[in-house]
Amino acid sequence: MKEEKIATRESYGKTLIELGKENERIVVLDADLAGATKTNLFAKEYPNRFFDIGIAEANMLGIAAGLATCGKVAYASTFAMFAAGRGYDQIRNSICYPKLNVKICATHAGITVGEDGATHQMLEDFSLMRTLPNMTVISPSDDTQTKWIIREISKIEGPVYVRLARLATPIIYEENQKFEIGKAIQIGKGIEGTVFATGVTVSEAIKAQEELKTQGIDIRVVDVHTIKPLDRDIVIKCAKETKKLVSVEDHSIIGGLGSAISEILTEEYPAKLERIGMKDSFGKSGKAEELMEYFGLTSKAIVEKFQR
Amino acid sequence: MSVVLEKLDIQELEKKARKIREDIIEEVYSAKSGHPGGSLSIADILTVLYFREMNINSKNPSWEDRDRFVLSKGHCSPALYSCLANRGFFPVEDLKTFRNINSYLQGHPDKNKVPGVDMTTGSLGQGLSVANGMAIAGKMDKKDYRVYCVLGDGEIEEGQIWEAAMAANKYKLDNLCVIVDNNNLQIDGTIEEVMSSYPIDEKFRSFGFQVINIDGHDMEEIIKAFEVAENVKGKPTCIIAKTIKGKGVTFMENQAGWHGKAPNEEQYNQAISEMRQRGQV
């Protein structure tokens, strides 16, 4: 893990420019948040393929669907709250059911939105998006992974939800790291425990892993970048090989990563899982790092799970 | 076009519309469910679109240069299916399988199951946004196709319609033609009683549309409105079609109760014989 930090929304914006050059079918839509979602980078390069639909997320998603019926690969961005929340019915009925090629790249997910507070901190999007048939749900953890996934999803037919963050987090992977949709990344081989993490919490899990190592506790981290389809094999493997299972996410513990892992464990290999995440509560204003501390989503909270 | 030819055309269209109406009743009667009222109110408009206006190919339903049609008020699928079947997209006898568990003819249109359906609809308020996307794509790709979108007068109570109307204006979608089926009835009563969307024409005009008011059961007016729409430049068109819910079946006309109800055997026989008699006049 490097010292250098970058927000996955930045990585998204930069990758869109390259993708736009390579693939003329790419179109990008935004709902008056282009500066924040970083689609403004694409807009500058390709103004004729960029559509600012204004503060009308439902309409943006519908227009994206219409463009997709005509062969365009539509990347639609706004804050996660207004994509998965405001636009749920449109995503379900106009995008997922007809299986249209719309890539919903939602930024500012989770409490790491920070100062804007609870109304803007989307904590239920995994839950809402992963129940939708035909939907693929992705939650990249760093710059390298985001660059990969933004390209990768242009190659698959059908809807994808990508959850991106406002907060700058460390670069975890080397440029040549190989990724595959649906295949989680195991970091370390410790058998004392497994931390399943996703998005902004992966770097926290790695920090916890390093801290625990100094205390003689060797755990592994699993970066679950694909929330759906979730990597069943790695969940079962880690349940068999390690003594304790913990999940950590900047999302409600109801319906998110922890729930998805529990579903697999229940069916395949019953094991106890401790879930770290937002515990059936809304967020609040504050700096992102302060909020992670406040709600117990940091490496410290993970370390404590293994010290008891 | 000579006057005589035009008149013949209209007569043929009227005959076709009677067949479309009969099939709507067949579908809803066979399914023992469905939405006859609104299907009958758009039957004439859809007949003109499918048998005169739209450039489509039943042998190649996904032909990329085709005109597009979005039935935003998706519950009126019986009218759309009836037009598609009679236009050769699939067998007319399949209409009797409407809403059946083994049928591809879903209660609401499904673009991946039914040949000729350009967009999946059902959740009201979403179709105009999709039609915008199709029209924008047409302009990007320098295609000549036109996009038609039928909305209900109750449906336009949905806020997304007005988001979409704003966008159609921003992108100057003169290849887009919206038709509002103004039958003045929604499930809970009249439009005025439930949540008035009036004045519909002034609303669309103020949203930047070319607005045309017509009688939605007068073939000549429908044809003329589409001709005007095709020649409008720099802005979208909205045709407000004054219609009668349940049009063509006397006991269903102007009855909100026939929004989503199938006729029983006696009512079915009455409806069919009434329509056939009218055809012989």
Image: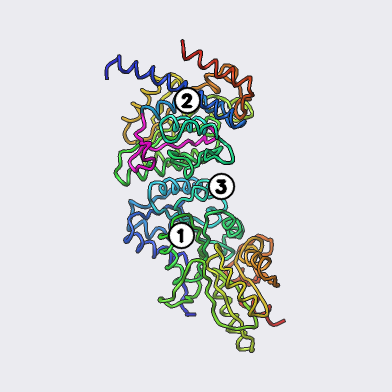
Q: Residue B59: within the magenta?
A: yes
The location of residue A91, given as percent across then percent down, is: 52, 50
Q: Are marks 3 and 1 in contact (CB under 8 Å)?
A: no
Q: Amino acid at mark 1?
A: Thr
Work out how far the residue at label 2 is from the one at label 3, CA to CA, in angstroms: 32 Å
Q: Residue B223: within the magenta?
A: no
* Residue under numbered circle 3: A89
* Residue A37: image tag: 1
Height in image: A24 above or below A295? above
Please tell me how many numbered marks the rendered image carries.
3
Work out how far the residue at label 3 is from the one at label 1, CA to CA, in angstroms: 22 Å
Q: Amino acid at mark 2?
A: Ile
Q: Amino acid at mark 3?
A: Asp
* Residue B196: image tag: none
**Which residue lies most toward the right here?**
A308
Q: Are marks 2 and 3 in contact (CB under 8 Å)?
A: no
The location of residue B160, given as percent across then percent down, is: 51, 41
Which of pointers 2 and 3 indicates the residue nearer the eye?
2
* Residue B20: image tag: 2
Q: How is the image coloured?
A: rainbow
Q: Is residue B4 left or right of residue B270?
A: left
Q: Mark 3 or 1 closer to N-term?
A: 1
Residue A121 visible in image: no
**Which residue lies most toward the top here?**
B281
Residue bounds of the magenta highlight:
B53-76
Q: Label 2's element?
A: helix
Query: Circle 1 marks a residue in which chain?
Result: A
In-front residue for pair B116/A273 = B116
